[in-house]
Amino acid sequence: MKRIYSTTGNGIGGQIKRRYTDFVVEEVREDGRVCTVKRFNEEGTHLEERIKVPKQTEGVEQLHLDLEKINKDMNFTIRQLARYLQCSNRRISYAGMKDKRAVTCQRISIFQPNVERLEAFGSRGIQLRNPGWEKERLELGLLKGNKFTITVRDIDLPQEEIEKKIKTCFKEMKNGIANYFGEQRFGGIRQITHRVGKEFLKGRFKEGVMLYLTHTVDGEQEEIKKARERLYETGDFAEATRLFPPKFRYERSMIHHLCKYPNDFVGAFGKLPKKLRYLFTHAYQSYLFNLIIEERIAHGIGLKKIEGDILIDNVPTAQLFGFESEFTKGKLGEIEKKILKEEEISLEEFRVKKMAEISSKGTRKAIVLFPEKLKLVEIKNDEFYPEKLCATISFELSKGNYATTVLEEIMKKQNHGSESR
């Protein structure tokens, strides 16, 4: 998808996520407190620290803690912690997903954990801190937003020009930028999550599962790329169980099911965690949302309020389509209908009878993003790229918004990383 920028001028170029500490995400809690990264930042000691859980108050069953991690998938982290505590994954909850290839810190809650085991927990890539008992468990969305501290490397510009471009871009962004969903929503390097989601919504479960299992792109590890290509050529699920590397556990669980039930693609998709299954639908909704923004810009409407706009906090919104969605009146409704027609999808198809949990009623999301506390932290020589410079910036975003939306405007460079929400 071609990005239409909201800011003028050329970007600074460069690349992100050269190393994990280049992308730091700190959750901002509902009360404004920040879950601060301490162990895995550049100045951190990287030493393990054990926590001391305070005495539990009678009737208060949820233990809240800060969870800091480095290069860890959230679902994997929860499973690792639950396995150690000898409890169900469902006892552990959190307010928002965070990046894997990053250093992140966020609040989690655990229902009635084994305190003795928890106090003995240690991991090279996970740190638990600041325990406290609360009555309520954390649920998705119970956060204010995220603070990002990001280093852009491999910049081939003089320091004065980098500083000027960044500060000029910051000034423009204060008026708002197009609130695109970032590329992490669409599946990282393969960028197929939304395409798979569309197949499922259309009821084409075989096509969706096979797309998920077999689609390859340049840049994937050679072993998994060859395994995908071989499965595409042969359709031999028994052979695929041997070829797919163990770390691709989601693919392997689907393949194992198809070995037993070769035509049960609905059941194979059902082997994925429930939260993950819904992400495919949401990815397709997000793709359509981005198309609406692009169409507004192409029609000269842009991000400004016009007649027919539905506002949230006085900001125009666009559809995240679902089976209960209603078309907006006037020109905006024409854009919505045009997009759905071109995509050959109907609102009713967001109701999936064979797998109700991936159905969606629909909602709306602001089309304008207002980054806060924009700051140029430093510009210095880049130790990874001789004769190049790197720039570290920080900013805060409200929940549900993406750091690479901001980075796209600063770098003016497509396809360079992923982000948190």
Image (tube, grey):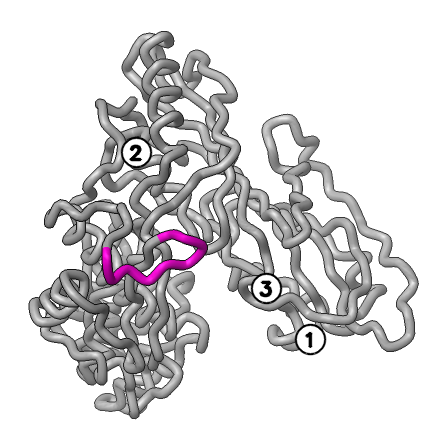
Few, some or many residues within 10 Å of mark 3 (<14, 14–19, 20+): many
Task: Give left or right: position of 87 versus 155.
Answer: right
Discs 2/3, front? 2
Q: Is residue 161 above or below residue 359?
A: above
What kind of element bears circle 2? Answer: helix
Q: Does residue 394 appear left or right of residue 111 in this picture? A: left
Q: Is residue 223 magenta?
A: no
Q: Position of residue 317 (x, y in %)?
A: 33, 58
SS of the residue under disc 1: loop
* Nearer-N-terminus badge (2/1): 1
Q: Residue at x 35, y 18 (%)?
A: 385
How far apart are the two marked residues, 2 and 1, measured between alpha carbons? 44 Å
Residue 279 is marked as: none
In this picture, residue 77 sits left or right of residue 268: right
Direction from residue 148 to residue 199 in the image, left or right: left
Stretch in magenta: 307-315
Sooner in the amino-acid sequence: mark 2 or mark 3: 3
Amino acid marked by disc 2: Glu
State the residue position of label 3: 78
In the rendered image, residue 291, in percent from the top left (x then y), is placed at: 19, 56
User: Where is residue 46 drawn, in percent x and y?
Assistant: 67, 36
Write the residue at 13% across / 70% down. Answer: 337
Task: Name the residue carrying label 1.
Answer: 87
Q: Indicate the amino acid at tag 1.
A: Cys
Q: What is the CA distance from the residue labelled 2 to the residue labelled 3? A: 34 Å
Residue 409 tag number? 2
Residue 130's place in the image compared with 375, above or below, is: below
Task: Determine the residue positioned at 37% across, 83% down.
Answer: 270
